[in-house]
Amino acid sequence: MQSPFEKYRLRLLDSLFDSSISGVVLDIGCNIGGVAKIYKNNIKKAVLMDKDSFLLKCAGHFNDYSKNLSFVCGDLVNLPFRDFSFDNIILTEVIEHTSKEVHKKILREILRIGKNGCTIFISTPNRLSLPALEGRFIKIFLKNYVWNAWDNTHQYVYTSREFIKFLSLSNLCIKKWFGYYFLPGSLLIRLPKRLQQILGYFSYLVSKYLGELFPFKYLGFSTIVELQKVGN
């Protein structure tokens, strides 16, 4: 069942995609296809890619196997696509599942397969978010503790400032970026559903109207960035 925070995260992405998504889309790390559901009716074609074949099957079922969607099991570091193939590329909550050492290669691959003028949407957890204060508190007592945004499959979590600096070194123009506020389902499960809905909607409003402003853009649980490829 979709959590209120996931529901409003998708609503926020929908408003971000509204004027930007068109043509041929690559959705990397598509999971069960939740993001595809909000753009599939506005595009010519989309390729949903994940390394987990079971999740790809779920994505197909979740999106009623729409004719303009295809599904590819692939590796983020070695993308199985030709140069200049896509008008839009989406990586939401994906890059943190890989080691920092391969992140430059991932960006090179994205630049390779994106058309000139390609719009890229990328998001990742923020190591200096308000929820991450939990990790800083634990580290007082456990010196070797590393906050991983409540997911043991995360290999590297950036701060917002660090992530923006990393993206700025590539041949990509940053059009906008903001902090997104939400709490993971593991922290919500004990709360009444009504309170979950209220907190989810409140986080959406903060993200939408304050997320681009200082200091909110630096403190969101995730950093969401819209970029554009400006050359070869």
Image (spheres, rainbow, N blue to C red):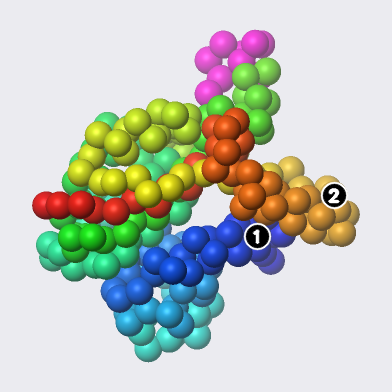
The residue depicted at 29 percent of the width and 53 percent of the height is 228
The location of residue 199, given as percent across then percent down, is: 78, 50
Quadrant housing residue 156: top left
Quadrant housing residue 52: bottom left
Q: Which residue is mark 2?
A: 191
Label 2's element? loop
Residue 133 left/right relative to 42: right
Q: Is 144 included in the stretch rendered in magenta?
A: yes
The location of residue 104, given as percent across then percent down, is: 24, 38
The location of residue 179, given as percent across then percent down, is: 55, 42
The residue depicted at 60 percent of the width and 31 percent of the height is 215
Distance CA(mark 2)–CA(mark 1): 17 Å
Closer to the camera, 223 or 136?
223
Crowd around label 1: few <14 · some 14–19 · many ≥20 (10 Å): many
- Taking 70 as reference, is 82 above or below it? above
Asked if marks 2 and 1 touch (Cβ < 8 Å), the reply is no
The location of residue 140, given as percent across then percent down, is: 65, 11
Whether residue 51 is visible: no
As drawn, the residue found furthest toward the bottom would be 67
Q: Which residue is mark 1?
A: 8
Q: Is 206 included in the stretch rendered in magenta?
A: no
Q: Amino acid at mark 1?
A: Tyr
- N-term mark: 2 or 1: 1
Label 1's element? helix
Range of magenta residues:
138-149
